[in-house]
Image (cartoon, helix red, strand yellow):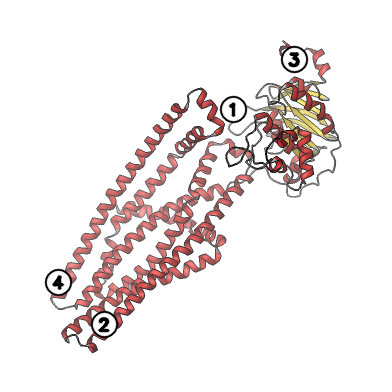
Amino acid sequence: MFTFVAQKLGQSATELRRLPSALRLAWDAAKLWTAAWAVLLVVQGLLPVGSVYLTRPLVNRVMAAVKAGGSWESVRPAVTIAILFAAITLLTELLRSALVWIRTHQSELVQDHITAMIHRKSAEIDLAFYDSPDFYDRLHRARSEASYRPVQLLESLSGILQNCITLAAMLAVLAPFGLWVPVALLASTLPALYVVLRNTVRQHEWNVRTTPDQRLTWYYDWLLTSHETASELRLFGLGETFQSAYNALRRRLRGEKLELAQSQALGQFAAGAMALLAGGASLLWMTWRAIRGFITLGDLALFQQAFQQGLGLVRSLLENLGQLYSSSLFLGNLFDFLALKPTVLDPASPRPMPRAIESGIHFERVTFQYPGGRAPVLSDFSLTIPAGRIVSLVGPNGAGKSTFVKLLCRFYDPNAGRVELDGMDLRGFSLEELRRRITVLFQEPVRYNATAGENIGLGDRGASGMDIEAAATAAGADQIIRRLPGGYGNLLGKSYVDGAELSTGEWQRIALARAFLRRAPILILDEPTSAMDPWAEAEWIDRFRSLAEGRTAILITHRLTTAMRADEIHVIAGGRVAESGSHEELLRRGGLYAQSWARAAE
């Protein structure tokens, strides 16, 4: 046991090195509240000692008053001490309430501060991190515990600081009875310290080991409660399947957690019993000394109060230490997550972006493989898109068309080769400036639970209402929006009251308007007509060329009826450009494009 305690105390000291960072988090989030919290802790830590210290003179004065026959002169000192005792008790309760109020303010600010840090880091890091299961495990641990760990951390720190102050004073009170008394008090808590450290380590190891399973329960819960999955679950009768999977997983996790709790309860009982035996033996010794007349009854009362409170303080201190150790392990998860560094970075001295694109976009022998991928998505890929032209990228799923977009937006950097804009490597530009010159309709656009106008306005936060309506008209979304009861002020999505749900094609029009709103020189549309019916597609394509005038437009599509309207079509297959040309040229060649056109015609 002693070896384990020493080992775990060493590990605890290593983990607790993060405490300065934790305190800095609290200070950065709530300076005034943290300062007030620290002052109250010191005062509240000293008040219990005053109560205990008054026990001896109170008992002695009462005994003296009894011997004197209860006259007022003999009772008055005892009454004075009793009033002081009551004042300290009242002040203790007042400070306890004030501390709860202060800690609530402090913890709420700290929680929001940590959540904001997680949000900033999630928005800052590379898209490549989202390709890693380990990243999702880290993110899950950081997010799931951020809602309560800051509060627990502050409460643990409060308890430790306050209990340390009180315990130090109690030991000073007990020291005159013999140096063995403080030693016995501290030694009696070694079993409890062992239990606390052992259980904390086991709980943390269990949390780390079961993180993928806990994320899976969240996923099953989302499947069973989400609007996106509701139709398919009902059609295929999948509700019971996923409920069974969720319940089986939760049953196993619950069983393991209850087993840990049972082991913890038994250990705590055994440690508590040993501490009580030590306390009982010490009290018997002091009672025998009082009977022999070596100490007064006041001394005995003081000893009993101080020793029992000391045992309680040490137990509380150990519990807080265990919670603090557990919270420091969480801080390890948090700080590890916050320490993630993006690899797609701004250059030290960014080049100025060209005001207008003159020569165009060029992929020069680009090879790219996703992190953890089995093979390159693009291999020795070369493609030139002249400025001001409308081009289509077509090809089978997985050919690398969407990857082309991600590399052009610098969500990733190529493993080999270069992506150039007007002959300059994209890595030489500021990320913010580069992305400001690109607007994209992604293959799976986000459906924001905001008003129709806000949904479109997110494409350019400085746009006016007229600009938003013009973009909606260009995307064919204006009539959809005007049919809503609240028009552009109508909330979209059924997650909130008065929200209107749109069809997949209508949501796509909203996203298309958002892309059009940003008057960027590079316009990328990934499957812009995939959710449109043929009539809507034809009507939209007829307007598209005028909308794209003066811009370099890239259409990524499986619909050859959309692709055929481009100035040039590039067929991507096997991570390379298989063939290029206009619609008529590709049909004459009889290659992949012509074969796909023939199959579509059939």
Image quadrant assignment for residue 401: top right
Name which residue type carries label 3.
Trp
Q: Which residue is mark 4?
A: 288
Q: Determine the residue positioned at 58% across, 32% down.
A: 372
Residue furthest to the top = 602
Q: Is residue 262 above or below residue 172?
A: above
**Would you say 152 lies left or right of 194 here?**
right
Q: CA distance from mark 2 to mark 1?
A: 84 Å
The residue wearing badge 1 is 374
Mark 1 Cα-neighbour bin, 10 Å: few <14, some 14–19, many ≥20? few
Q: Is residue 337 above or below residue 473?
A: below
Question: Could you tell whether 35 is left or right of 400 in the image?
Answer: left
Secondary-structure class at tag 3: helix
x and y, in percent, of residue 259 in the image: 32, 42
Residue 476 placement: quadrant: top right
Residue name at image x 77 percent, y 38 percent: 471
Give the distance between the C-alpha atoms of the residues marked 3 and 2, in whole angstroms.
105 Å
**Label 4: how many residues lie within 10 Å, few (<14), some (14-19) or many (20+)?**
few
Mark 4 and mark 3 in contact? Answer it, CB < 8 Å.
no
